[in-house]
Image (cartoon, rainbow, N blue to C red):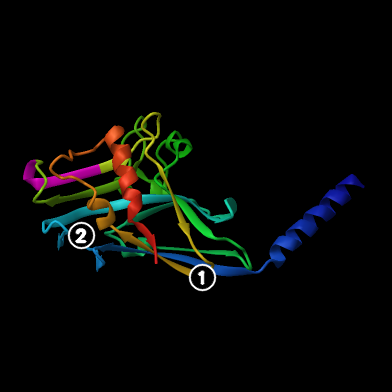
């Protein structure tokens, strides 16, 4: 008798889930520099009348969620996406969500959480062949930006920012929260100048390991995300 009750409850629960209608959900990331479409290996003029070129730009988005009044109402699975300027297909995240869901925020992490880092090198977007993994000890690179500009005092005017780290006190992951109203497609601008304009290239040194400067630079990088 007890087994029949459990079986009946299972059927009712799953019937309820299957009966829920779903609707499309899509995020389109739009990389720009001073409102101009961003491309690798192309020179751009900064607000300081300097020229700058980007040769590599990619970062991880994880734990994407919809939030209503500070409460998570939906989480996207799988939870890890590599946005790579070299691959325009990576700019889109598509899913479905339950119909009539109420939310007023889109949140996600810029980077990879500590639990995933201690799980070792994984596959898919987290595969080490993506060039975003240091070692088992240092973990994943959350964000990679490389290029050159006249103001940089490094060799060949280069700059290299590999931002990551998951162990205290150098946990570099950043939470992004964007206020929104419900719609089926969202355009999230990646305005790189919002970050770059806060970097003093006369003082900035290459960052290629977890450390204090990586966290400080990661905080600056959060300013490039703008909901359109």
| Quarter placement of the C terminus | bottom left
Numbered disc 1: secondary structure? loop
Q: CA distance from mark 1 to mark 2?
A: 30 Å
The crowding category of the residue bearing disc 1, from other C-alpha atoms within 10 Å (few below 14, some 14 to 19, many at least 20), is: few
Element on which disc 2 rests: loop
Tell which circle, 1 or 2, labels the residue nearer the N-terminal end: 2
Instruction: Locate residue 181, reporting x and y percent.
Output: 52, 66
User: Which dot, 1 or 2, sits closer to the camera?
Assistant: 1
Query: Could you say where residue 54 lies in the image, as x and y percent from the top left?
Result: 19, 55
Question: Circle 2 sits on which residue?
Answer: 40
Picture residue at 45% right of the left edge, 40% below the top: 113
Q: Is residue 44 above or below residue 152?
A: below
Spot the residue most to the right: 1
**Location of residue 29 with respect to 157 vertically, above or below:** below
Give residue 138's mark: none
Residue 210 seen from this side: no
Which residue is label 1 attached to?
184
**Residues rendered magenta in the picture:** 155-161
The residue that appears at 70% across and 61% down in the rendered structure is 17
Q: In this view, which residue lies farthest toward the front? A: 48
Q: Is residue 142 left or right of residue 2?
A: left
């Amino acid at each position: 008798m007890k087994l029949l009750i459990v079986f009946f409850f299972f059927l009712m629960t799953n019937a309820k889930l299957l009966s829920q209608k779903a609707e499309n959900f899509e995020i389109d990331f739009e990389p720009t520099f001073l409102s101009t479409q961003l491309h690798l290996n192309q020179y751009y003029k900064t607000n300081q009348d300097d020229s700058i070129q980007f040769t590599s730009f990619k970062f991880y988005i994880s734990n994407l969620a919809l939030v209503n009044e500070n409460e998570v109402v939906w989480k996207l699975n799988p939870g890890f996406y590599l946005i790579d300027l070299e691959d325009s297909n990576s700019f889109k995240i598509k899913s479905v969500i339950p119909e009539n869901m109420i939310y007023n925020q889109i949140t996600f992490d810029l980077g990879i959480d500590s639990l995933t880092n201690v799980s070792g090198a994984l596959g898919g977007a987290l595969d080490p062949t993506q060039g975003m993994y240091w070692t088992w000890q240092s973990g994943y690179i959350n964000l990679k930006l490389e290029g050159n500009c006249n103001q940089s005092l490094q060799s060949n005017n280069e700059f290299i920012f590999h931002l990551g780290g998951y162990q205290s006190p150098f946990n570099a992951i950043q939470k992004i929260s964007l206020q929104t109203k419900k719609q089926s497609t969202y355009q999230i601008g990646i305005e790189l100048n919002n970050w770059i304009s806060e970097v003093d290239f006369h003082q900035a040194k290459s960052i290629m390991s977890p450390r204090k400067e990586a966290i400080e630079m990661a905080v600056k990088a959060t300013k490039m995300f703008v909901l359109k």
